[in-house]
Image (cartoon, helix red, strand yellow):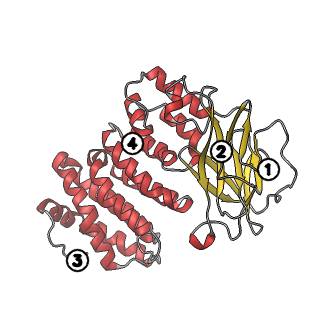
């Protein structure tokens, strides 16, 4: 390893003490075929790893050596996997943001378990970036907001998992609600945007309601006095030329109780809730069935009038729908001149969507 400039004396001392092991680990990775840019690696150590080691040493001097070695090993895994080496895409930038901005805010927890904290949070960035790139920055923002208030590594990692749902990954909703119930009430309230004035019993009741109704928002969850209403709750998808999914205006249908979307070329399963939506490629699923919706389920007519169990509302921007599909909670609608999927639901006193 080259000599570093502008680092603290304690970091210089720890590097000298561990130089043999650290260099051996680095060379072993390169001999195994890892393509690690030496300059980028040294910059990472100087800009991201050593400042964390220095901070840990100031609060728990006896943990400095362990922190250096474990952060070094996690960093080697990331570099060997090529995650810091991409020349296009956002992954190197969001990983750098995690290491330069988020992890320093969590130094007290890093001191307790450097490998688990840095490794788990880095893996979370990788997983979210691969599944829903647009959610990564929201996840980091939520981690920065709530993470420093956690008192244990276990709670921090629970926060990270629940934050993935809040950041816009609806596939984690039910598991995230279960994890949120394991958090201290005040932490769950901050993470989920629930009023601090509510009791633990009330918070648990809200979580239970969210587990049943994917669209209930805070004003409904915290009140029993809202009148039933029909609302558009999400706008999903866009033209492929603008970074979206669809080459042609899409149509929607239900297969095995789940919403699906097709642009005649491909099929996606659509998952959505109050925090976000995600499309999963599902080309093996049968294409749209042209049958009209049954009369006893929510539907929209050509004038944009939605009928939903005794409640009706005209959505004037949703006239002349080309397709509609209802999965038991959500009415999905498409238009002839739009690359979007419009999602509608029933909210209010009835407790959210009704079957």
Q: Earlier in the sequence, mark 1 or mark 4?
A: 4
Q: Which residue is mark 2?
A: 344
Q: Which residue is mark 1?
A: 255
Give percent across and percent down for residue 265.
76, 69
User: Of the residues tagged 2 and 4, which is closer to the observer?
Assistant: 2
Q: What whole-number distance in Å separates the C-alpha atoms at marks 2 and 3? A: 59 Å
User: Of the residues tagged 1 and 4, which is closer to the observer?
Assistant: 1
Q: Which residue is mark 4?
A: 156
Q: Secondary structure at mark 2?
A: strand
Within 10 angstroms of label 2, few (less than 14), some, or many (20 or more) residues?
many
Q: What whole-number distance in Å separates the C-alpha atoms at marks 3 and 4? A: 35 Å
Q: Secondary structure at mark 4?
A: helix
Q: Which residue is mark 3?
A: 2
Within 10 angstroms of label 4, few (less than 14), some, or many (20 or more) residues?
many
Q: Residue at x 79, y 50 (%)?
A: 255
Q: What whole-number distance in Å separates the C-alpha atoms at marks 2 and 1? A: 18 Å
């Amino acid at each position: 390893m080259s000599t570093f400039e502008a680092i603290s004396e304690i970091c210089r001392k720890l590097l000298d003490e561990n130089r043999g092991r650290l260099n051996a680990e680095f060379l072993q990775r390169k001999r195994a075929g890892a393509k690690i840019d030496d300059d980028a690696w040294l910059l990472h150590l100087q800009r991201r790893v050593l400042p964390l080691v220095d901070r840990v040493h100031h609060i728990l001097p006896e943990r400095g050596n362990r922190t250096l070695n474990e952060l070094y090993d996690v960093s080697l895994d990331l570099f060997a996997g090529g995650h810091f080496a991409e020349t296009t895409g956002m992954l190197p930038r969001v990983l750098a943001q995690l290491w330069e901005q988020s992890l320093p805010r969590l130094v007290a927890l890093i001191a307790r378990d450097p490998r688990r904290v840095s490794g788990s949070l880095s893996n979370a960035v990788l997983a979210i970036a691969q599944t829903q790139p647009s959610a990564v920055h929201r996840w980091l923002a939520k981690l920065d907001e709530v993470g420093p208030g956690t008192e244990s590594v276990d709670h921090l990692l629970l926060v990270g998992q629940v934050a993935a749902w809040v950041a816009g990954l609806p596939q984690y909703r039910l598991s995230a609600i279960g994890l949120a119930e394991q958090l201290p009430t005040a932490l769950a309230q901050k993470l989920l945007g629930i009023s601090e004035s509510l009791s633990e019993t009330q918070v648990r009741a809200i979580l239970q309601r969210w587990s049943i109704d994917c669209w209930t928002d805070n004003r409904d969850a915290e009140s029993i006095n809202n009148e039933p209403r029909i609302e558009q709750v999400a706008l999903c998808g866009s033209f492929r030329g603008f970074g979206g999914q669809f080459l042609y205006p899409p149509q929607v249908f239900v297969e095995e109780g789940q919403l699906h979307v097709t642009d005649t070329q491909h099929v996606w399963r659509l998952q959505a809730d109050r925090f976000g939506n995600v499309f999963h490629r599902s080309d093996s699923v049968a294409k749209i069935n042209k049958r009209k919706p049954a009369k006893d389920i929510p539907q929209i007519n050509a004038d944009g009038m939605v009928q939903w169990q005794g409640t009706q509302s005209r959505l004037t921007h949703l006239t002349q729908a080309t397709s509609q599909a209802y999965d038991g909670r959500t009415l999905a609608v498409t238009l002839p001149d739009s690359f979007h999927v419009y999602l509608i639901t029933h909210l209010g006193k009835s407790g959210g969507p009704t079957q």
